[in-house]
Amino acid sequence: MSGIAAAAPAVHAHHDDRSFIRKYIFSTDHKIIGIQFLFVSLFFLFLGGLLAMQIRWQLGYPGRPMPGGGILPETMAPGGVILPEYYIQLVTMHGTFMVFFAIMPLLVGVFANYLIPLKIGAHDMAFPRINMWSFWSAFTGGLVMFASLFVPEGAARAGWTMYAPLSARHDLSGAGLGQELWSISIVLLGLSSILGSLNYITTIINNRTPGMTWFRLPLSVWALFITAILGLLALPVLSGAAIMLLFEQILGTHFFDPAAGGQVLLWQHLFWFFGHPEVYILILPAMGMVSDIVANGSRKPIFGYHSMVFALVGIGFLGWVVWGHHMFMSGMNPTLGSTFMVTTMIISVPSAIKVFNWMGTMWRGNLRFHVPMLNAIGFVAMFVIGGLSGVFMAATPVDMPIHDTYFIVAHIHYVLFGGSLFALFGAITFWYPNMFGKMMNERWGKIHFWLTMLFFNLTFFPMHILGMGGHMRRIYDPTQYNFLKPYQPMNTFITIAAFALFASQLIFALNFILSLRWGKKAPLNPWEDNGLEWTLPTPPPHGNWDRPPTVYRGPYEYSAPQVAEDYLPQAKKLPTDREPAAAPVAGH
Amino acid sequence: MAHATATVDVMRPPAPAERGVDVYNLKLGMWVFLASEVMFFTALIGSYIVLRFGASPNPWAQPGKVLSIQITAFNTFLLICSSVSMVKAYASIADGNVKLMKVWLLVTILCGATFVGIQVYEYTHLIHHGFQPSGYREGSELAELAAANPVPYGAATAGLYGSTFFTMTGFHGFHVTCGVISMTYVFIRALRGKYSQQDHRGIEVIGLYWHFVDLVWIILFTIVYLI
Amino acid sequence: MAETRHAHPPYLLIWLYLFVLTVAEIALAFELPFSRNVKLILLLLLALWKAFLVAMFFMHLKFEKWNLRLIAIVPLPLALILVLAVITEHVW
C-alpha cells in the first residue's frame, strides 16, 4: 500500500514530526536504513578484522601466546595460545562475517538503499516498510551469528563454505549449536537480501523521475540493479541449502549424507550456484560506484557508457554458468569442469572491458586526486591483479596445484579487499558529506589510502608465493610441514604487514567517527558532481524532494562546452533543453 | 496536492520515466518476489530430483505405498478450488461487486485453512506409522513392512525419501499458512471497506501469491505423490 | 476504468480443466498399464500443462506485457541449468 506514496508529490519534507524511534530505529526512510546498515556492517568489518589478526598471529608465530590473548576463555586460547579448535572457528567466522555481514551489506545494504532513490529522483523506496524489515532481518541474522561465537563448543567450524558432511554432522565438526546458529543466521540474511533486492528492482523499474531514462541512469544504479537481480535469484538457493543443512543438523535428514544415499557434492553445487553470483554481488556495486567516482575525478564523461552497461548485463548473465570453477578439485564430472573452464574464461571479458573503460576515462582527463579518486584508482589497480590471478585459476590444469592454497587466499583478498574495500573507502568518503553534512578529513584520508595501499600489498602479494609453494589454506601450524618451513619467515613478514594494515584502518575509523562531530561542514556539492543527490541540501530531508527533479541529460557530462563550469548536473535546465515527453501510460 | 491524488489511478504504475512493465509497484514487487520463490523451490525440488536420480539403481518407494493418495488428491482438489475462488474474488471486485468479493475471499481462506489442517493430519498420521524426516523409524509399522518388501517400500532410499518429502511439502505448507494468514488480513481490510473497483491492489497481489502456491502444489503433487 | 479492461477469462472452465487433468493424472499413475518411463513423461507433461493454465489465466500472464512475463520466465532457465548440471554428476 505504501507503494503509491511516490505517485503524489509529497509536501512533508520540512516539518518532520516523527518520534525518535520512528525516525532513527524503526525508520522507513531509505537514507536512515542505509546509515543503519553502514554502522552495523562497519562493526562487523572491524570484528572480522580482529578475527583475521588472530589468524595471522597463529600463522606468523605458531604456538606462541598471543599478546592480549589471555582474555580469551580456556576453551579458545589457554594462556593466549590459540587452540586448533578455535583456529578453525576463526577462519570460518572471519570469512562468514566479512562476506555476509560486512562487504555485502556495506555494498548493497548501505549504498543500494542510500543511493538508488537519491540518484533516480524518487522520494523513497517502492516499499519503505519492507525495506525496514530487510534491515532488521539482516541485523537479527548478524546478532545470531555474533552470538554463536559465545555458545558452548564455540562457533561454526566447517569453513565459511560449510562443506557437508563436516558441517552437517555434529560428531564430525565438534560444534553443535554453533553450526545450527550459522544456518539460522544465513537464512535470515537470505530473507533480508531477497526483501532488499525486490525493493531495489521495483524502485528502479517504476520510480524513476521524468527524464531519467534507462540510459541516463548513473552506472552505480545500473550496477546495483544487476546486483539486485543476482541477489534476488541467488540468495533463495542459499537459503534453501542452509535450511536443508539445518534439517540435517536438527532433524537427522540425509541430503548430504553419503551413507544413506545423500550427496556431498549436492551441497557444493547449491552453495556455489549461489556463491558465484555472490562474488559478483560483492564486486558489481563497487564497479558501479568506482565508475561514478572515476568520471568525477577525471572531469570527463565515462568512456564507453553503453559498453559499461552491457558489460554489467553480460556479467549478470554469465555469472550463473560459472559456479563449477570453485569445484574443479571436488571430483566433479570432468565434462562439466571443461564447460565451466570455458565459461569462466569468457566472463573475464566484460570485466576487462570495464577496466579498459576506466583507464580510457582517466586518459587525458583533468585528474583531481581527491580521496575518493585515489581509492577508485587503487580499486582499478588491485582489481586487475586479482582478476589476472583469477584467470590463472579458471584453467583447470593450473588450478589443480594451486587449489585450496594461499594463492586462492591472495586472489580473493585482492578482489574483495583490494577491490571492494578500496571502492568502499572511496564511496564512503565520496557520499559522507551527503549522508552526514560533514566532510571527512582530506589529509588523513590520503594518509590512510597510502598506508593501506602499501600494507595491503605487503600482506597479500607474498601470499601468491606462499600458495605456489604449496602452503595450504586453513592450516593451523605451517611449521609442521617440512616443505613449508623455509616459508615461515615470509609468514611472519605477512603477519607484521597485516598488523600494520589493521592499524592503518584505525585511521579510517577515527576519521569516520571524529568527522561526524568535528568535520568541516559540507558545501552543497563538494565534489562538483552531476548526480541528482547533490541538488539536495546535505543531509537530504525526509522524503528527499518537494517536487521530483526533471532530468535533462546523462550523469557524466563533465567539461561540457555549453557551460562555464566543468560539470553539468543532470537536473540543470539549459535554454536548449526540452522538457522530457510525458511518459506514455499503459495502453489497453 | 489532494486533487492530484484523487485523479491518480492507483492500479497503474507511478508516472514512469519510460514505459516500464506497466504495473503498479505492489504487483511488480510481488512478481519479483515470486521469481525469487521459484529459485527457493528450485533448491528444494531440484535437490529431490537430483537425489532421486542419483539413488538409482536402489528403488524409490512406489507411489501410494507410504503416502495416502486419497487424502492428498482431496487436498489437491481443495487447492484448485481455492485458486478459482481467489480469482473469482478478484473478478468480482474488478467488476465492482464488493459483496461477492468478500464471499469468494472467505471461501478461499476456508479452503486454504482446511488444506493446512489436512496436511497436519497427514503428517501426524505418517509419523505415527513411522515415516519421519530421517526415514522409517526403527521398530515402527513402516519399518517392518519395508524390511519384508524392500522394493515397493524403497527400503534403501527411505532416508532420502523422508528428507525430501518433509522438506518440500513442509515448506509448501508453510507458504500456504503464510498465504492464509495474509489473506485473513486482506479479508479484514475488505470488511472495513478498503477495496473498491478503483483500488483493489491487495486482492490482486495476494491472488498472485496464492496462485503461485497452488502452482507449486500442482508440481509437488505430481512428482512426490504420483511418480 | 474496469470497462476498458479485458473481459474475464472463463475461470470455471479452467477449473474444470484442472480438475479433469488431476483425475487423469491419478488414473494414469495407478490404473493405466503404461511402462514407468511413459508414465513419468506423461505425468510431467500433465503437471506442466496444469501449471501453465494457472500461470496464464489465474495469474493473468496471458494478459500482461512481455517484460512482465520476462520476470516470470527468467528464473526457469536458471532452475533448469542447476538441475541438469548437477544430474550429470551421475552419468559420467
Image: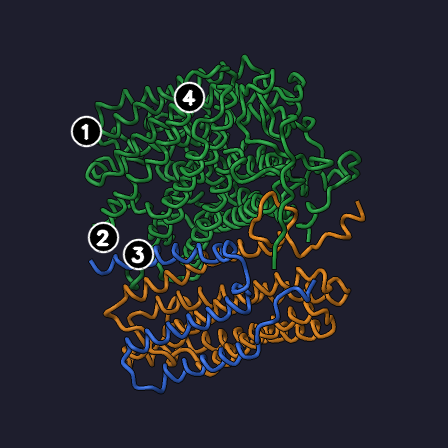
Chain colours: A green, B orange, C blue
Residue located 44% across and 28% down the image: A69
Disc 4 marks a residue whose amino acid type is Phe
Which comes sooner in the sequence, label 1 or label 2?
2
Mark 1 Cα-neighbour bin, 10 Å: few <14, some 14–19, many ≥20: few
Q: Chain of mark 2?
A: A
For the residue pair A180 and B96, the one nearer the viewer reads as: B96
Marks 1 and 3 sit apart, C-alpha to C-alpha, by: 39 Å
Q: Is residue B192 above or below residue C50?
A: above
Q: Residues within 10 Å of mark 3 (few under 14, many from 20)?
A: many
- Tag 2 residue: A333
Amino acid type at mark 1: Asn
Res. A74 visible in picture: no
> Which quadrant of the view contains residue B112?
bottom right
Which subunit holds the residue at mark 4?
A: A
Tell me the distance, in whole angstroms, between the alpha carbons under discs 1 and 4. Answer: 26 Å
Residue B131 visible within the image: yes
Q: Quadrant of the N terminus of chain A?
A: bottom right
Q: Which residue is mark 3?
A: C86
Q: Which residue is mark 1?
A: A482
